[in-house]
Amino acid sequence: MTQTIRVVDKILGANDAVAAENRALFDRVKVFALDILGSPGSGKTSLVCRTAREAGLRMAVIEGDIATARDAEKVAETGVPVVQINTGGACHLDASMVKTALEGLDLTALDLLVIENVGNLVCPAEFELGEHAKMVVSSTTEGLDKPAKYPLAFQKSKCVVLNKIDLAQPTDFNLAEYRKEVAQVKGDLAVVEVSCRTGEGLEGWYEWLRRAVADLRGS
Amino acid sequence: MHELSVCQSLLRVIEDHLPSTDCRVTVVRLRIGALSTIVPEAMHAAFPIASESTAAEGAELQISRVPIAVRCEDCGGRTELDAPPIICGFCGSVRVRVEAGDELLIESFDVEEPEV
């Protein structure tokens, strides 16, 4: 005899439950947790390193990569605490990986925890880690079409940092057109134009971050 | 490309709801939003691998696609879309709130008890 079992439950419910535990911890210690998404080569690690050196925030970093500790080594040079997660083939971080990584970090006396996800605009968008915000690092060299092609990553984000703005002209990148593309995926999504090479625009990004940290403190 | 790990999570949910230890799952019904990054074809490819030697081995996966639904904050209209641009279909505003389309849900599954 066939019996139908009604469930109506989130498939990733188990991940969401661990994410909620992580989030409760971040809220308790008042550390703003940021999940950074972006294509390989968009400049995520460069942005993390400059932020570590220049934003004036007490931060720690979790680096997610399929393999190697190269990103963590770069971040460690800035002097901030960093934990590397190697996913061993998985294309995204999940909440349990972050929970394990948190054991290696002292969250007290921090303002900001940056979680640099695996370079991929697809899968990381689907997994909650317990973060207060997701964001996308994109770059002029990737072209205009990333928001339309990867709408979930942009839809779930609170900010887009558009990197390599110094290369906008040589790559014929149309900034007004890009802002329009972003708005057509998420109307109120902030776009901050920066160059991690020249430093242009980074102060605007640090401003966004400091405000996010202050808002959490105030809540 | 993360469909295999999604299938593994799905199988854990099914396992938690199994009415008995010796029943066999024959059909699994999912609702996947159009905004989701999950590719149905990849789910169909991954599910037999993930479900091997479980109660759901050999089960049929039925996936229904949920359109993106947005509510306009300017005119109040509700629009259903299959893909971006995610804008109001009535007034064209980008000031819209996503009400549906990012879900990744298991709706139900069928089980057969062994003949006694």
Image (cartoon, coloured by chain):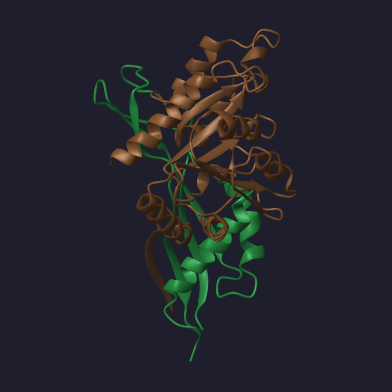
* Rendering coords of residue A206 (x, y %): 48, 26
Image quadrant of residue B101?
top left
Q: Quadrant of residue B77 in the image?
A: top left
Furthest toward the left, the residue is B76
B98 shown above or below A181: below
Q: Residue at x 42, y 38 (%)?
A: B67
- Left or right for A166, reference B91: right
In this rendering, does residue B37 appear at all? no
Which is more toward the observer, A33 or A171? A33
Q: Which chain is brown?
A: A
Q: Residue at x 65, y 16 (%)?
A: A198
Q: Colour of chain B?
A: green
Choose between A3 and A173: the one closer to the eye: A173
Residue A70 x/y as whole percent: 74, 43
Looking at the image, is A148 positioned above or below residue B47? above
Asked whether A105 or A64 is in front, the reply is A105
Q: Is residue B64 visible?
A: yes
* Residue plotted at (57% across, 37% down): A37
Residue A80 location (% of width, % of height): 59, 43
Q: Is residue B115 left or right of residue A199?
A: left
Q: Nearer the viewer, residue A58 or B103?
A: A58
A13 above or below A194? below
**Residue A201: x, y in percent?**
54, 17
Q: Position of B52 compared to B103: left or right?
A: right
Q: Is residue A216 above or below residue A140?
A: below
Residue drawn at (53%, 56%) of the image:
A102
